[in-house]
Structure formats: structure tokens, C-alpha cells
Image (spheres, rainbow, N blue to C red):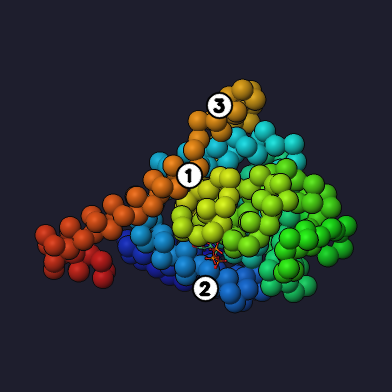
Amino acid sequence: MTDIHVPPDHPRRVSLETRHRIIEGHKKHIVATAGLLAHGRGEAFDYMIGETTTDVAKEAAQATVAAMFLAEWPVISVNGNACSLVPDELVELSDLTGAPLEINLFYYRKEREDAILRTLMEAGAKKVLGTHDRPSETIPELSSNRRKVDSEGIAKADFVLVPLEDGDRTEALRRVGKYVATIDLNPMSRTALYSNLTIVDNIVRALPVMVDFARELADAPDKELKDIIDSFDNTANLRQSIKLIGEHLNDMARQADRHPQKFVDEVSD
Ligand code: ATP
């Protein structure tokens, strides 16, 4: 998966390997240059949340999978960063939930579309929507390239999962009546706030959790799925994620007060 060698006990190992995957994705034209910066923003929030999947993120992931099963026409929107980090899991989630994968790019280049398509196919995808040769329609609320959507995908979807997204597109999708779920490490981003369901977690951790929930809920009756969604409060969940970041930072500050040298040694390791 990655050709850099990070010692197994390095405290930043997973983060460094993930970063390297994004860099490799950029070299292969999967990730746009702006995607490198978006990843850095995500890394910063991951640091603050403690680089762990919180219980509230798990609840949001479960509600999102339940919503995917209940939707008539669910679709998973794929951009360069998501494709580069979790191609196998995207295909698995798509297979388990019946939600097709649709490529949707802000910085469109045919070369990028081809590289993303190839990666998803290599990961086992049988069909990928959103390619230039497919029938398309436009979402008038959006001015960028991404206004073009697949006629058999986002155009007719009632549910769209938009991981690592920007706020304008999320808002536009909501305005045209889509039920939107996202995965975003920043609980204060506009995407996190505008989405119906927000999983505040790193996509590299969240997708495997979603795949597990998809296996678990595959045969669940609609009533059970509805109960999961009805008992989930996205605003409370976001508030809790912000609080957890605050608590984590307070813990760090307390450790620094108590054992200044030990703290510096550990953090700068
Ligand atoms: P908004 O317009 O919604 O306020 P933004 O301008 O920060 O967001 P982008 O720069 O496109 O949007 O960044 C996409 C979002 O994806 C950021 O909020 C970032 O924290 C998040 N992000 C980046 N990498 C990851 C990752 N690996 N897992 C989860 N979220 C990530």
C-alpha cells in the first residue's frame, strides 16, 4: 500500500502512512493539488480529536448506514481524496448497501477521472457512475464543475453520501431536496453543519466501521433501521464532537502543567 518505512512503534505511524497515500494519489493524478491542503486540514482536526473513532462517531456511522438501507436511491459520491484513501472500503460499502459509486470532481480533468475510475475498478467496482461518457444532468444551484451529475446517480438519488466535501456543494444538494450524509473531521465545517448526518472521524477509520455496520444491518427490518435514525440527533452529536475536542485539548494542557518535560518528550517523539 505504501512504500515509505515508518517504524511500527512510531507514534505518528498511521498518520504518516495515510499522508503518504495522499501524496502517492497526487502523483497518480487521483488527488488534486488542493486535495493535499484539504487533507492537512483534516490531519489537524484528527490530532485534536485524539486520532480515534469516538463513540459519537460510531453512532453517526450507524445512523448513516441505516439511512442508506432505507433510501430508495442511495449514492456514494467519490472524490480524489476518498478514492486514494479507501478504495476497497468504498467498493465494499457500495456492494453491501446497493448504493452506486459516482465520481464527482471539483477540479475535473479527464486524466483524473480515468485514474479514479481505474483505482475503483481495481478495487473491485463493477460499475462506476459520473464518468464523462455517461448520461448527465445539472444541479443548477452549483456553479462549479460538480453541477454535472449522473442521470442514474445523484440526479435521481434521495440520499447522497459526500465524504470530505466542501460546504457549497453540500448546501446545494440539500437545497434540491437530497438527504445528505458526510464524513468530516472538522465538526465546524459548513459541510458538517449542513449535512443531515455527520460522521466526525477520519475516513480511513470511518469507512471500515461503516462496512461493519452494513454487514450487521443488512437483514435488519425497516422498523429497526427507522428506530436507529429516529433516536439519532445530528446537532447533539456535532455538539458532543466539539466538546470532545475541547476535553482532549484540556487533558493535554493538564498533562503539560503536571509533567512539562515528560509531556514535551511524548508529544515531540
Ligand atoms: P467547508 O466548505 O465545508 O467549510 P472546507 O472549506 O474546509 O469545508 P475542504 O477544504 O474541501 O472544505 O476540506 C474538506 C473537509 O474534509 C475539511 O473539513 C477537512 O477537515 C476534511 N477532511 C480532510 N481529510 C479528511 C479525512 N481523511 N477524513 C475526514 N475528513 C477529512
Query: How many labels sit on residues?
Result: 3
Q: What element carries label 1?
A: helix
Check the image and report above or below for 106 versus 120: below
Mark toward the start of the polypeptide (2 vs 1): 2
Label 2 and label 1: CA atoms lie apart by: 27 Å
Provide the residue designation for mark 3.
227
In percent of width and height, residue 191 lies at 56, 57
> Is label 2 or label 3 in front?
3
Q: Nearer the viewer, residue 57 or 211?
A: 57
In percent of width and height, residue 261 lies at 13, 68
How dense is the environment of label 1, judged by Cα within 10 Å: few (below 14), some, or many (20 and up)?
some
Q: What element carries label 3?
A: helix
Provide the residue designation for mark 2.
37
Mark toward the start of the polypeptide (1 vs 3): 3
Provide the residue designation for mark 1.
235
In percent of width and height, residue 235 lies at 48, 44
